[in-house]
Amino acid sequence: MSTSKIGRRTVLQAVAALAASGIAPNLLLAQSGFSARPGRALPPRGEFVIRGATVLTIDDKIGDLARGDVHVRNGVIVAVAENINAAGLTVLDAGNMICLPGFIDTHWHLWTSLCRSVIRIDDPRRSYFPVTNALGRHFTPEDSYRSVRLGLAEGLSAGATTVHNWAHNIRSPEHADAELRAMRDTGIRGGSLTARRRAGPTKSRWTSPALPRHSATGCPTTAR
């Protein structure tokens, strides 16, 4: 199939394929009623102690602990020590486990998450750039929102808790709002830099959008 025939139908087929594969059926299909309303409030994070893990702090002042505890309150690490008094708190047994800071992904085009099921590295006509060039023009704000949520769900599952989203398919202010809202609704740490694609006679190029309020916008610095 040539890239000129890849359109919104293919995007929907990609969504269906992802759902059928069991990667994220609830994420992609259970959400409905998309609108420009503000992001949803995250659930309460509570307070707990991670007990007895091998703690890799990546902090010269604290060092690594062969056996240590981590005290978390409302999504923020408030203490790291060999033994923390957890009276009255939920305790998570982390014996024989490693506790370390989440990974940071500094270069991620989250909007392309839905495109991966139709990208083929062995077919030049369906490699990354032809596919994203063809599909990107058909993305609605809802498509962008759900694709970002899918990518972030995969990132969190893999241990990434901070991301920088290079959002380079911003076709309107609503697209920018949708990508930022998806990051806020997920509760991940991160920032987003936006750009829009301008199609030329032989190739596409990227420019800064006429959207100054979205040119460099950070999401809330929440811990995960």
Image: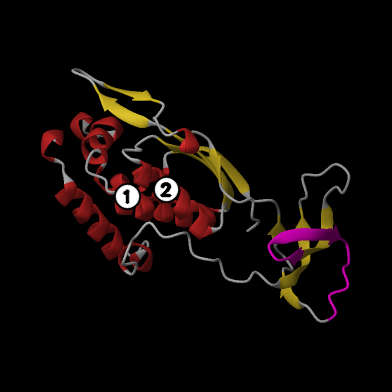
Q: Earlier in the sequence, mark 2 or mark 1?
A: 1
The residue where tag 2 is placed is 177
Q: Nearer the viewer, residue 135 or 94?
A: 135
Residue 121 visible to the viewer: no
Residue 131 in the image: x percent, y percent?
A: 24, 37
Mark 1 residue crowding within 10 angstroms, few (<14) / some (14–19) / many (20+): many
Q: Which amino acid does label 1 sit on?
A: Pro
Residue 146 in the image: x percent, y percent?
A: 36, 55
Q: Residue at x 34, y 60 (%)?
A: 35
Q: Residue at x 31, y 67 (%)?
A: 32
The C terminus, quarter of image = bottom right
Q: Nearer the viewer, residue 37 or 63?
A: 37
Q: Nearer the viewer, residue 143 or 84?
A: 143
Identify the colour scheme used.
secondary structure
Horizontal side, residue 26 vs residue 12: left or right:
right
Horizontal side, residue 195 vs residue 192: left or right:
left
The N terminus, quarter of image = top left
- Label pair 2/1, CB-CB below 8 angstroms: yes
Q: Is residue 215 above or below residue 58?
A: above
The residue where tag 1 is placed is 141
Q: Tag on residue 62?
A: none
Residue 158 in the image: x percent, y percent?
A: 53, 53
Q: Give the range drawn in magenta.
A: 72-87
Residue 39 visible to the viewer: yes
Q: In this view, does 199 lie above or below 222?
A: above
Residue 10 in the image: x percent, y percent?
A: 17, 49
Mark 2 residue crowding within 10 angstroms, few (<14) / some (14–19) / many (20+): some
